[in-house]
Image (cartoon, helix red, strand yellow):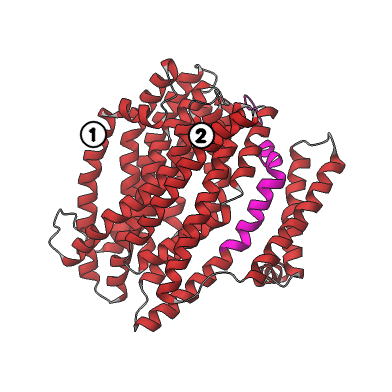
Amino acid sequence: MGLVRVKVVAHFLGADAAADAWQAAFKIPNFLQNLFGEGALSASFIPVYAGLLAQDDPQEADRVAGAVGGLLAFGVSVLVLLGVLATPLMIDLIVPGFTGEKRALTIQLVRIVFPGTGLLVLSAWCLGILNSHRRFFLSYAAPVLWNVAIIATLFVVGGRTGQAGLAVAAAWGSVVGSALQVLVQMPRVVHLLGTFRPSLDHTSTHVREVIRNFIPAFVSRGVVQISAYVDVVLASPLPTGAVAHLAYAQTLYTLPVSLFGMSVSAAELPTMSSALGSQEEVARQLRGRLDSGIRRIAFFVVPSAVGFLALGAVMARIIFQSGRFSVADSTTVWAILAGASVGLLATTQARLYSSAFYALRDTRTPLKFGVIRVALVTALGYGAAFPLREALGIDGRWGPAGLTIAAGIAGWAEFLLLQRAMGRRIGRTGLRTGELARLWGAAVLAAAVAWGVLRLLGAHQGLLASTFVLGVFGGGYILCARLFRIPEAVAVVQRLRRPVP
């Protein structure tokens, strides 16, 4: 649904100044939601809460949940107030290249969406409760309402106002969607908690452990999220449309990160946090969970990276190209996707390794490596987007592609550091060279067949033809992976052959 939302935004706003303002403004709620929902709160709260549930101590678990909920609500209220007051300063830091009407519109949009952002942070607390009880569907289905609210607003208001007015209306729609996202989760959360009472009591040993782990986790996830802001900061002085093109491409290349990296990591965190026994027994359980999760992630992410590199223009054409989004825009998005394919596998696997450290109540190691990643993103991104591009005489519209290449290199550095550090704790983990070679081989063969079909179609590359090409790629990958005896592909084929009862 997030992908549908971005497609509708692209249709109505295209890649002009209003689209730049919209994409920059929504970096802030995305930042806070990712920081709290998939970052600091999950890393600090879920291991403690899930551990208490595993030890069969529901009363203490409820007390911890109530205290964390109360403290979070208080902190969010302060955060929203400060955010609304300090919006002009934040805009100057995030998009220093914005001036005049574009800057004014971005400030207005941020001030509208900030209260909704506070509600999204409370939704992250609901996510922690539900995930710890192995109730994954509702917490990840609830954001559908947020997306639907924005989509509905765009269709209702579209054509009745200018681009700036349409962006403002959609921002109000996001606030309504944020409220719906929390309300739909709350009844189930209250039912699971039983004796839940919100409070500000932080005297409990377990609550203090959550707070103690929250601070480095907050900084760690904040550092990782800042890398996305670095891209926007560096893209803002580039020609108009650079920020919007980067945001559209990010929607596509973060899709496999969300579908496979974040989902596997979120599902594994409560399980890894519940591991009991001796140090060797816990290490053995973690190795098994990590290896299983990495295989699942790689099976889907490797073809995603190859698809972005070989067929990124086809994907952009299918998803975005309509209304104010042109063929040239699709080509630019393809270039950015090709750059993002460099670090896609590393980024998704790094999330799982970070979850393993969080399960061990270690939030400082991911922080240390996250700082290294951001330093590399900043240095390499600036060099690729400006001095190197200018020295090679490359047009400014291709600058965002250099940013994603730099982010990919930094992502590999972070992943390798995390993997090495975890290996010292629990033993060797990760894909073997032969397994990885078979995955890449299957994806490349499938892409070659799909590319051949694309060439045969020539100028006849409408929506149906483009969809057919991607279908050939996906089906070809499954078949090639099955021939290479990749277990996940074998399981997929067996499911397809299974008779319907």
Q: Residue at x 36, y 24 (%)?
A: 107
Q: Residue at x 28, y 66 (%)?
A: 48
Q: What stretch of residues is rendered in magenta?
A: 297-325
Residue 374, above or below 484: above
Secondary structure mostly taken by the magenta-highlighted segment of the chain: helix
Q: Looking at the picture, which amino acid does disc 1 mark?
A: Leu
Residue 37, above or below 238: below
Residue 470, above or below 415: above
Q: Looking at the picture, which amino acid does disc 2 mark?
A: Ile
Q: Secondary structure at mark 2?
A: helix
Q: Is residue 406 left or right of residue 266?
A: right
Q: Residue furthest right?
A: 456
Q: Secondary structure at mark 1?
A: helix
Graded by Cα atoms within 10 Å as few (under 14), some (14 to 19) or many (20 or more), the crowding at tag 2 reads: many
Quadrant housing residue 325 = top right
Q: Is residue 351 left or right of residue 477?
A: left
Nearest the viewer among 161 and 91 is 91
Q: Residue at x 28, y 33 (%)?
A: 83
C-alpha gap between disc 2 and disc 1? 27 Å
Q: Which mark is residue 151?
A: 2
Q: Residue at x 71, y 68 (%)?
A: 493
Image coords of residue 485 (percent x, y):
72, 73
Residue ID for mark 1: 81
